[in-house]
Amino acid sequence: MRRLLVAVAVVLLSAGCGPKTPDYQSIWTTSATSTTPTSAVEPIPFPKYLEQIGVGQQAVAPDTLTDLTVSIPTPPGWSKFSSPAIPPTSYVITKDGPYPNAMLIVVRLFGDFDPRDAIKHGNADAARAQNYRQLDASNADFHGFPSSMIQGSYDLDGKRLHTLNRVVIATGSPPDSQRYLVQLAVTSLADQAVADAADIEQIIDGFTVAAK
């Protein structure tokens, strides 16, 4: 799922009660942060973990799915962004340059595995980011699907970034009931996070993952 996924992949009530939208603006305006605990064993990147348990992976464009709806809204002033560094199956929108941005990635999963066990590893990539400081995290369901979400800041290419990253293991409609890994990563420059908060909240609020 390429370096871009690892770089940006670097929270909610139980299903049935409905997902709780993170208060992105209040989080970015507080100074309280916690450094990700250090460990003698570096977390395994989520794609690598799936590979180790025998799960095949195939990236697909969100708008090509026939059994699952995956989408985000486009706030005013934002537009689709393309670059040779971004796989054509990824959907990216930005405002006035590379940041702020929102990226959608969908990966078709193959093999027998427990989604609720696998999703426990969904936040592992964030702990690998340079100077990562966690703000919030959760493994609560998202629209009834197993999900992990983490918010925090990290360094990348000389910039300090704030990001919200959500991973969902979703199941498409019958009869195939195909499983997918869906990832949304919304990223802004640290010194612009407050100014970008309203747009980012709109994207987070409008993120949709649902069987057709």
Image (cartoon, rainbow, N blue to C red):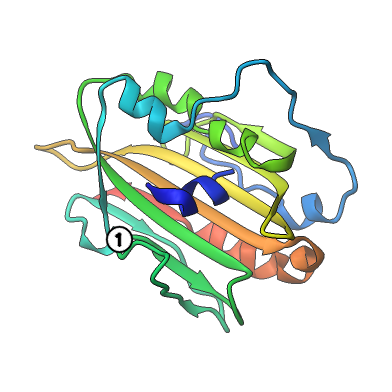
Front residue of 202/50: it is: 50
What residue is drawn where x is 54% and y is 79%? 78
What residue is drawn where x is 63% and y is 69%? 100
Quadrant for residue 146, please give it.
top left
Front residue of 94/206: it is: 94
Q: How many marks?
A: 1
What residue is drawn where x is 60% and y is 38%? 126
Left or right of 34: which side holds 57?
Answer: left
Left or right of 160: which side holds 127?
Answer: left
In the image, residue 206 lies at what x, y percent? 50, 60
Kindly give the residue lying farthest to the left in the view shown: 175
Left or right of 27: which side holds 188?
Answer: left
**Amino acid type at image mark 1:** Thr
Q: Which residue is mark 1?
A: 89
In the image, residue 13 lies at what x, y percent? 58, 33
Secondary structure of residue under mark 1:
loop
Quadrant for residue 198, please give it.
bottom right
